[in-house]
Image (cartoon, helix red, strand yellow):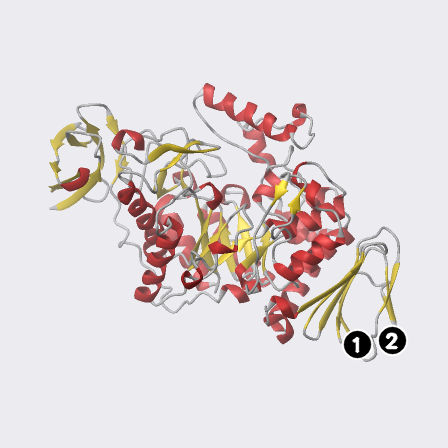
Amino acid sequence: MSSISVWAPKAHEVCLVLLPEGERVPMVPGDRGMFTLEHPRLQPGQCYGFSLDGGPMRPDPRSRHQPEGVHGPSCRVDLTRFSWDDAGFQAPPLGAGVLYELHVGTFSPEGTFDGAIARLPWLKELGVTHIEIMPVAHFPGQRGWGYDGVCWFAPHPAYGGTEGLCRLVNASHRAGIAVLLDVVYNHFGPSGNYLSEFGPYFTSTYRTPWGDALNFDGPGSDEVRRFVCDNACEWLEHYHLDGLRLDAVHAIYDHSATHILAQLAECVDDLSVRLGRHLVLIAESDLNDAKVVRTRAEGGYALTSTWSDDLHHAVHALLTGERSGYYRDYGKLEHLAQGLRHGFVYRGQYSPHRGRCFGGDSLGLRGRQFVVCTQNHDQVGNRAVGDRPSMSASVAQQKLAAAIVLLSPFVPMLFMGEEWGCLQPFQYFTDHEEPWLAEAIRSGRRQEFSAFGWDPRVIPDPQAEASFEASKLVWSDASSEPHREVLAWYRSLIALRRHEPSLAHDRLEETAVDYSEEAGWLTFRRGAILTVCNFRDETRTVELDLRGARTRLASDPEISVASRHIALPPHAVAVLEV
């Protein structure tokens, strides 16, 4: 006999529906809205669903497989059947990591987990230590970013489902690469979301951009919190993942004495001890709030690290001159200097874009507690046409941006294809069946982009398959110029970061930054490694004591180093040992 349970406090009666016959078997009610049942047919491969108070069949909220889509029946899966051979693998510490964000559907021609496996040798040679996979929890249709998932426990079938994800993680570990997964605990997608019929998963007390917030502190919230923690632990334990990236934690509302993020961190810590593996939690937060990574003793949530968009914005504004939307808050070398020194640029000072003081103090944090980048899915895909910096920036500018991120005291993250200056966009794409929802997505994108002054007429249709196809990487480009030059630069920077002892220390107070706003140069020093950057369109000479200095890397052969100064061509960067 096999058992099954479901939390459905809104229902008086719950029946298990067994397919294909549609047999309905009453479940046994228990405490606090839990219904359970033992039945001999509940074996792997059996399709089923739940009927609440005689209503239509609904998928299992904890379904591991939805063979007919998010609206169809669930299917039993035994996660213990996969033959793992990664027992000797241990993820490297995040502070020693180089992360690589990828979207499964556009990363390879196949658009599957198995397609990604074929590219692991490339990532290994590049120097990547962790891949970070955009959400794979089952979402509507065949293609999408994954942030509108509704079946949190079910890997997307179009990518290869449960077995495919296991194969990718197993192969990654054999290649010596850790795997992180992006998960979304701040909302569910609008299509295929039946949870409100089961119980109080949502609350109108708080509103998010996606509607009612998840209920983490109201009546019935104990089971909602358990749902989240169980989901996180299932990915980490049964799929052997090495960590999770938590999407938009600023849209998680919880006034409990123990915040859900702190509870989640504690559960993952316990799991890490039990499994004997290093596990990490990385938050995406739009609040510049160090609380998410501070220890519990300091009143924090004790997550491992947080994304810092500030460094991206500072570099982007300097190199592109864009000042619309949130880029209004950046554009000076002072902003980049503050980001390199503190992780956050805004730590309580006035933000013109927000019209208020913004951010909190980062005193005492280490570089490993910040993940930084010059590209990610949001900063590329949430532009009007999904254009990457490499589609408009010069090779010199791309090299300059890469050096800042990869030689910074923080954890660097690349976005797929960035390493060769990919010229394909990464556009927003969906595959919703409902016409009303498709139109709502289109109009919502147009309204969002108006804040940046972008022409809504040029915005690709998210529902068009062409938007998805245009976003696929063209790997053959990497072997031609100027892409080979960019790729060689990235490989050199990553190798230097890995092997240079000075770059292993991440105490922010030991990162010395100097700059001239007027002349357009900036330097930052970590131990014996001095990085000198020219942000201007003309050659700049920087007066420095460089007696005995040795050039480790130079983005341009015309860089001239003398004992008392260095001359940098436009947007050039030199890495010196001093």
* Residue 387 locus on image (x, y percent): 66, 39
The answer to whether 492 appears left or right of 13 in the picture is right
The answer to whether 57 appears left or right of 135 in the picture is left
Residue drawn where x is 63% and y is 30% of the image? 449
* Residue 108 seen in the current view: no
Image quadrant occupied by the C terminus: bottom right
Q: Earlier in the sequence, mark 1 or mark 2?
A: 1
Element marked by disc 1: loop
Tell me where residue 458 sits by quadrant. top right
Label 1 sits on residue: 549
Tell me where residue 409 sits by quadrant. bottom right
In the rendered view, would you say 447 is above or below 310?
above
* Residue 218 seen in the current view: yes
* Residue 17 locus on image (x, y percent): 18, 31
Number of other residues with Cα within 10 Å of mark 1, as a class: few under 14, some 14 to 19, many 20 or more: some
Q: Residue furthest bottom?
A: 548
Residue drawn where x is 52% and y is 48% of the image? 285
Using the image, tell me which numbered label, if any, was put on residue 61.
none
Front residue of 85 and 571: 571
Residue drawn where x is 19% and y is 29% of the image? 11
Q: Identity of the amino acid at label 2?
A: Ser
The answer to whether 80 appears left or right of 285 in the picture is left
* Residue 118 locus on image (x, y percent): 50, 53
Front residue of 356 and 312: 356
Q: Identity of the amino acid at label 1?
A: Ala
Residue drawn where x is 58% and y is 40% of the image? 472
In the rendered view, would you say 118 is above or below 351?
below
Label 2 sits on residue: 563
Element marked by disc 2: loop
> Distance between the Cα atoms at labels 1 and 2?
8 Å
Tell me where residue 426 sits by quadrant. top right
Front residue of 436 and 103: 436
